[in-house]
Amino acid sequence: MKAITQDAYGSADVLRLRDVDRPVPADDEVLIRVHAAGVDAGVWHLMTGLPYPVRLGFGLRAPRTPVPGMDLAGRVEAVGRAVTRFGPGDEVFGIGRGSWAEYACAPEAKLAPMPRGLTFEQAAAVPVSALTALQALRDQGRVRPGGRVLVIGASGGVGTYAVQLAKSFGAEVTAVCGTAKADLVRAIGADHVLDHTREDITEGTRRYDLVLDIAGNRPLSRLRRVLTPTGTLVLVGGEDGGRWTGGMGRSLGAVLLSPFVRQRLRALLSAERHEDLLVLTGLIEAGEVTPVVGRVYPLSEAPDAVRCLREGGVRGKAVIAVRP
């Protein structure tokens, strides 16, 4: 089968389109004929092996799984003997391993039937990013109807879901993005839009019940300024550039400081759950959430998709069409 592979950690230049063996599903796994796969920041971290602690879980000198990719949507080709929810021919979406390939395996517990009305490309843009946004808002942020929510990084994969989900929970949403993407976040429901290229969002007088900082690098002290006295800050990732800590340094600082202040400071570690995929399916089918697919790349152009992501050129989420 055709697949994008890498033999070493590095930039997008290490990615190659090659012929590799088709994977074999374990007893609790599903073999999926992949139609589309998502591109997200997590894939970049695993590709580069940065920050370095990532390598403890995924291979010290080279990736243990040579085919990148987690998000996927496609049709079930075969199932392990312990799988009960799915059978050959079912259309599914979810999170697997090595999804930038014609075939990939995924645990049954990380899959769900594809939402009605979505294309494979749209469905592949959902799992990792939408699960992250859902758990950040609902579980860590405890968003409530009428609450004031600030989403920093609102135009990306996680951010576009966070804006829509916060609105579906009844919150008043202020979105932070660049000038070129302001119309996008307004179109998906943001009540207010702040342009981070024109103003310092931590210097204003407005206060928020929940601040969701997605892959940002602002110091905790500045983010706390825009919180209400008992508000909640949720850090989703982080890109402060350190090769050893990455965004983990700021996240660890938030966790250590939280017990000593009235504000709740949280760092998200998202979980990949079948049940939450079903929650997202319900919201999508009800028309409350719509995947924002910025650009679709053929499998052979996966390296370009990664480069565009790192340069900040993606509106919503980039997707790889394995079978257009």
Image: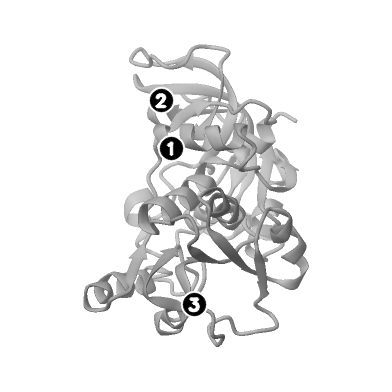
Which residue is outermost to the front?
146
In depth, the one of 282 and 29 nearer the eye is 282
- Label 3 amino acid? Arg
Compared across the picture, whether 125 is left or right of 144 comes to: right
Q: Which element is circle 1 on?
A: helix
Residue under the image location 47 percent in, 53 percent down: 46
Residue under the image location 43 percent in, 71 percent down: 243
- For the residues carrying marks 2 and 1, which lies nearer the camera in this image? 1
Residue corresponding to mark 3 = 207
Between the C-alphas of marks 2 and 1, the distance is 14 Å
Q: Quadrant for residue 10, please give it.
A: bottom right
Q: Quadrant of the N terminus?
A: top right
Q: Which mark is residue 108?
A: 2
- Labels 2 and 1: the sequence-earlier one: 2
- Label 1 amino acid? Asp
Compared across the picture, whether 11 is left or right of 209 comes to: right
Task: Measuring from the top left, give residue 141's x and y in whole percent.
Answer: 40, 59
- For the residues carrying marks 2 and 3, which lies nearer the camera in this image? 3
Position of residue 62 relative to residue 11, above or below, is above
Residue corresponding to mark 1 = 276
Q: Which element is circle 2 on?
A: helix
In depth, the one of 42 and 229 nearer the eye is 229
